[in-house]
Image: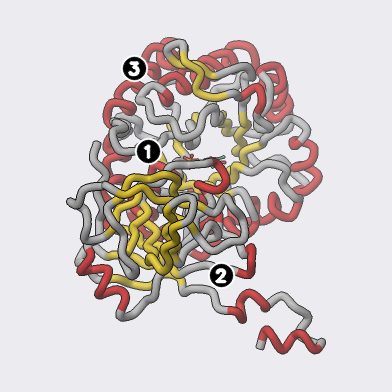
Amino acid sequence: MEKTTFVTLKELQAIDQHFPTPYHLYDERGIRENARNLRKAFAWNAGFKEYFAVKATPNPYIMQILKEEGCGSDCSSLTELMLSEACGIVGGDIMFSSNETPAQEYQLAQRLGAIINLDDITHIDFLEGALGLIPETICCRYNPGGYFTVSNSIMDNPGDAKYGMTTEQILQAFRILKNKGAKRFGIHAFLASNTVSNEYYPALAKVLFSLAVRLKKEVGVAVDFVNLSGGIGIPYRPGQAANDISLIGEEVRKVYEETLVPAGLVEVALYTELGRYMLAPYGCLVTKAIHEKHTHKEYIGVDACAVNLMRPAMYGAYHHITVAGKEDSVCDHTYDVVGALCENNDKFAIDRELPKIDMGDYLIIHDTGAHGFSMGYNYNGKLRSAELLKKPDGTVEMIRRAETPRDYFATFDFSKEYGALAR
Ligand SMILES: *Cc1c(COP(=O)(O)O)cnc(C)c1O
């Protein structure tokens, strides 16, 4: 598939009158359409709900849009819970899928009425200690170990992942939870990340539905919901075929009918906790070419850097780049597109074929809507950028301002001389 952008050079020039580069820009129309298609794909399941993985794009304006499209939130930290509450997403609309969780965070989750998803069998006692009770609704995270394969190819390596309980542990966990008075039960697993394959969810559903059948037979626990979690990916590279969400929904329905229904589990709600799939394609990082350097290689220096988008530096991830206004030009130049960090991995692209780039050109770095801004940091004293939202009517609203040096210095001791930096 060709990679396209949701913003034109003319629009970027207009935005520049109000907001300097770099910034992350999100496309409200795309976010809404995609969320609706996901709901449609799982409409056959009466209890279906997407809990948006807040860590992907922790911005209340984005969460509000998704809330309007029927989504809850999947949180795993104190501040994510606070964000969710601020958006009016509370109670059973919060999934708290955390790990290595401090007691205080379980307490806030419980106060908000969130569904707590336990990462380990030892967390039963920890949770009871923190809350003084076991919630009536409880979920446990499963990790079957080994490699997760689909059609004989390895998708990921759960045996090497820190998350979840073994089969024996999760069966035992539900025995204990049931004895302690829990009444509504759910199971969860996240076995592969960024899958660009229509087969991941159906294969994962098979694993979890089979576990649900065992839980019913061996423990006497009929699960109320199965949480398929995140992991549906997007085509970051041109030429990759996108997932077909309606096909995925349909294939999961088949597995549901083959596995759960014969065991008498006919009213199991399906939940998802998608982050990347909900947002990644509907955000981009807009940056300007400010330097060119001709040494052993051809470099284009831009005004964004890895603090604005860490994925290329961290995982060597591919993010497509479009030079605004040169969409149809031949890609007859080979560049490294680099940021300002004093780190040689601060490269948005290496040996990338692009049209000739001139100083002042806008570079649109694609698919930064999830795990983009949110992975940001302040290395080299670099500041986080603004986040902007392109509304369906084409207008652009700032949904988070850029950091200023005062934000960067805000945690110094105000009572002492260096506190002056923060004022
Ligand atoms: C990160 C995460 C997600 C979202 O993952 P994506 O790859 O963005 O879909 C969902 N659930 C949990 C528990 C996570 O840690």
Q: Viewed as shown, does residue 137 lie left or right of 197?
A: right
- The reply to whether discs 3 and 2 touch (Cβ–Cβ < 8 Å) is no
Query: For the point 55% across and 78% down, which residue is it?
Result: 404
**Quadrant placement of the N terminus:** top left
The amino acid at mark 1 is Ile
Q: Viewed as shown, does residue 275 lie left or right of 137?
A: left
Helix, strand or loop for disc 1:
loop
The amino acid at mark 2 is Leu
Helix, strand or loop for disc 3:
helix
Residue 71 visible from this viewpoint: yes
Helix, strand or loop for disc 2:
loop
Q: Is residue 214 above or below residue 112?
A: above
**Quadrant placement of the C terminus:** bottom right
First-in-chain label (3 vs 2) = 3
User: Closer to the camera, 73 or 277?
Assistant: 277
Query: For the point 74% across and 55% down, which residue is it?
Result: 104
First-in-chain label (1 vs 3) = 1
User: Closer to the camera, 45 or 372?
Assistant: 372
- The reply to whether discs 1 and 2 touch (Cβ–Cβ < 8 Å) is no
Measured Cα–Cα span from mark 1 to mark 2: 28 Å
- Mark 3 surroundings: few (<14), some (14-19) or many (≥20) residues within 10 A: some
x and y percentages locating residue 215 in the rendered image = 60, 17
Q: Total marks drawn? A: 3
x and y percentages locating residue 370 in the rendered image = 45, 50
In this figure, which residue is indicated by the disc labeled 2? 383
In this figure, which residue is indicated by the disc labeled 3? 254
The amino acid at mark 3 is Lys
In this figure, which residue is indicated by the disc labeled 1? 234
Measured Cα–Cα span from mark 1 to mark 3: 23 Å
Residue 70 visible from this viewpoint: no
Q: Is residue 299 above or below residue 289?
A: above
